[in-house]
Image (spheres, rainbow, N blue to C red):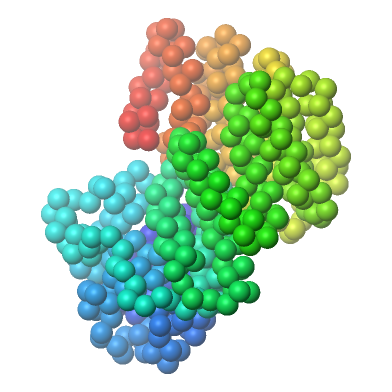
Amino acid sequence: MDDESSGAIWEFAPFRQLLAAGRIGPALALVRKAMGLSQADFGELLHWDRAHTGRVERGDVATVFDVRELRRIADALGLPRLALLPLLLESDDARTIGIGGREGADDVDRRQFGLAAAVAGTGVTAWATPIQVKPAHLTYIKTLTEQLWVHDNLHGGGGIARRANRQYRFVRRLMDNGIYSPSVGLELTSAVGWLSNTVAWLARDCGRPQFARQQLMESVLLAEQSRDFTLLAATVGDLATLAAAAPTTNLEPVRLAQRSTELVRSASSVRLNALKAAEESTAYAAVGDHREFERALGRVDRERDRGLDGDDHPAWLNHVTEAELRVHEARGRKLLGQHTLAAELFRESISRPENLPRDEASYRAYYAASLTGLGDTTSAITAAHTALDLLESQVNSPRLVAELHPVNRAAQRLRTPEAQHFTQRFNTLTRAA
């Protein structure tokens, strides 16, 4: 999971190599370009003018090597302080907060601990004066959110959830304590709300649904404050999905899903409307309403017939494909006890050319678990092995590892060589997750 087209620029070799060589100016230039900022906008984030930013990037300014200034720069950019280790160690293989593997900030070598502590300090340095929020800050938050979704689509949330939460706390502090006009305040609150929504999904993918729900409630408040009804619809829909995770007599999933649909009724995005109808179908299934489940599926089909292609969607809707909509139906059928049909729908969603890696891992895990529910343990283990192939390499998702627990329990009873091999792989991955 080291695709340099996703995640944060400071996680990748060019940034680390520049720091290891002591070229902090060009390293900051890489960060600026990854954020999509001009030198003037980047300077606003750091309280520099454009000319000073240019001098820093050319290496003409030495004051950036002061450890206090380095900390201030890292905090202003939301950059993990441990990402500065290559500068101190003069080594480009110094480990930072690893979105590309199983190791993170907690895995720094003992020999690096003293230097890490010097960089990391004891928490976020307090602002001496409130920051004036400018358009550059808004660009930064939106770019960060987009990067997190792109990475999640490719690799899951397991490697980046903690870093995303830290960055959310930084921008939330900026919103709560910064200085800005009412118009900038509305846009800032909306941007922070979208980041909060993203952090919630990443937490859920890490197997932390209660924290995800808490974060979604923050998103609801931010959506209301900013009057961003698309954000509100997305967040309420996510709450509906959480509430519909298992059969229930509580009508909360339906109420939430219906409200989410109402909020986007006039939206033109086919993917958005298809997703809302699919969320409603799952909610109805969770409460055992067969008729409304089928009616909602009819709306999904009508939206699908309009065509899911096009450029009318942001990164957080990239996963809404033909396969994903079928998986929503499969979840509903499973909730209604239609296990054979659910398994067939999960199977049909596997290996489609449009599947993103995280979604492909999801569908394989769901299919394997559904086969276990049907009592076909041998086929379930075979399918689960293909899910592990992705979860051991491209995709880091503790949530999907947990989906395979039923397969592992069945494999332990079977005791064949293939079953034992699966259990060994599963236990290794569970420990890592």
Q: Position of residue 403 (x, y in %)?
A: 50, 26
Residue at left 34%, top 35%? 432
Q: Nearer the viewer, residue 142 or 362?
A: 142
Residue 113 vertical position relative to residue 385 in the rendered view, above or below: below
Q: Position of residue 112 (x, y in %)?
A: 17, 57
Q: How many marks on residues?
A: 0
The extreme bottom residue here reads 51
Residue 296 vertical position relative to residue 68 in the rendered view, above or below: above
Q: Position of residue 376 (x, y in %)?
A: 57, 10
Residue at left 32%, top 85%? 59
Viewer can see residue 66? yes
Q: Nearer the viewer, residue 209 or 70?
A: 209
Q: Position of residue 343 (x, y in %)?
A: 66, 20
Q: Nearer the viewer, residue 398 or 220?
A: 220
Residue at left 28%, top 55%? 95
Residue at left 75%, top 58%? 312
Viewer can see residue 318? no
**Quadrant where the C terminus is found in the figure:** top left
Position of residue 409 in the picture relative to residue 294 (left or right): left
Position of residue 285 in the picture relative to residue 90 (left or right): right
